[in-house]
């Protein structure tokens, strides 16, 4: 390593831009690509190898069904399924679970009784509906949930019946 006049070590190389011209810096370890472009390139190579092997197995007439899950750059997973009777099928499965919309599939959540917009401040009842602060209690919205039977079952489970054995009299 060389030292300049100030006694500090000089940098060996200037930063190298990614060869895909994405604007980020690359490293020689990733073939002068940024980490994202390198990851995408490796993923494409794996998909190409898998497609080539599945086509080869179809041509050879092997009856092996394979399902391979590969991570996708968008944060989801891609499941590649090969079947001998047809071409490879690609199914994208999102790693995120779909958000359940409260109500009947409307945009903002609303009180089931008065239809007032409740947003994040809505109260969920055991009957499965969302209510505003006025209608949150079961007697205010004619709740169909059977609280009495639920409480009776909970008490029965929490307090099992204990019967002692009869003692012999002396």
Image: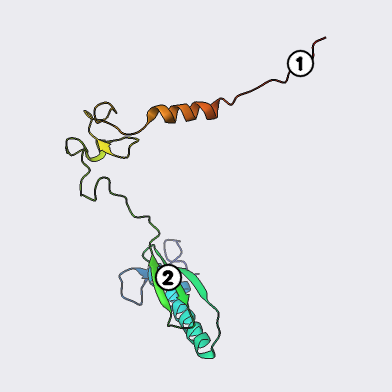
Of residues 128 and 56, the one drawn nearer to the viewer in this rendering:
128
* Closer to the camera in the image, 137 or 157: 157
Considering every residue shown, the one lying at the far top of the view is 170
Rendering quarter of residue 14? bottom left
Q: Quick one: label 2, few (<14), some, or many (20+) residues within 10 Å?
A: some
Tell whether 30 sits left or right of 23.
right
Q: Which residue is drawn at 76% across and 16% down?
A: 167
Question: Could you say where residue 21 lies in the image, as x and y percent from the top left?
Answer: 31, 75
Q: Position of residue 108 (x, y in %)?
A: 20, 45
Q: In percent of the image, x 48 and y 29: which residue is there?
A: 154
Residue 102's disc number:
none
Looking at the image, tell me whether mark 2 or mark 1 is earlier in sequence order: 2
Nearer to me, 72 or 36: 72
Residue 67 in view here: yes
Q: Badges 2 and 1: C-beta atoms under 8 Å apart?
A: no
Tell me which residue sits at (40%, 27%) in the image: 148
Residue 4 quadrant: bottom left
Determine the image quadrant of residue 20: bottom left
Q: Disc 2 on helix, strand or loop? A: helix
Position in image of residue 116 (x %, y %): 16, 37
Q: Please give the label number shown on residue 167.
A: 1
64 shown above or below 112: below
Q: Residues within 10 Å of mark 1 (few under 14, many from 20)?
A: few
Q: Nearer the viewer, mark 2 or mark 1?
A: 1
x and y, in percent, of residue 112 in the image: 22, 38
Tell me the SS state at disc 1.
loop
Residue under the image location 54 percent in, 88 percent down: 61
In the rendered structure, find residue 39 and report the number of the disc placed on it.
2
Does residue 13 appear in this view?
no
What's the CA distance linking mark 2 and mark 1? Answer: 76 Å
Residue projecting furthest to the right = 170
């Amino acid at each position: 390593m060389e030292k300049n006049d100030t006694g500090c070590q000089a940098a060996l190389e200037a930063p190298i831009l990614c060869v895909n011209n994405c604007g980020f810096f690359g490293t020689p370890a990733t073939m002068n690509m940024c980490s994202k472009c390198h990851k995408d390139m490796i993923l494409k190579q794996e998909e190409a190898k898998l497609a080539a092997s599945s086509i080869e197995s179809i041509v050879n007439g092997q009856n092996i069904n394979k399902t391979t899950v590969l991570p996708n750059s968008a944060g989801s997973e891609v499941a590649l399924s090969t079947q001998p009777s047809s071409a490879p099928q690609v199914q994208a499965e999102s790693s995120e679970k779909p958000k359940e919309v409260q109500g009947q599939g409307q945009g903002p959540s609303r009180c089931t009784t008065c239809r007032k917009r409740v947003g994040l401040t809505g109260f969920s009842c055991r009957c499965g509906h969302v209510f505003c602060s006025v209608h949150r209690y079961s007697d205010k919205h004619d709740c169909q949930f059977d609280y009495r039977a639920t409480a009776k079952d909970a008490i029965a489970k929490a307090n099992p019946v204990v019967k002692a054995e009869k003692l012999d009299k002396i």
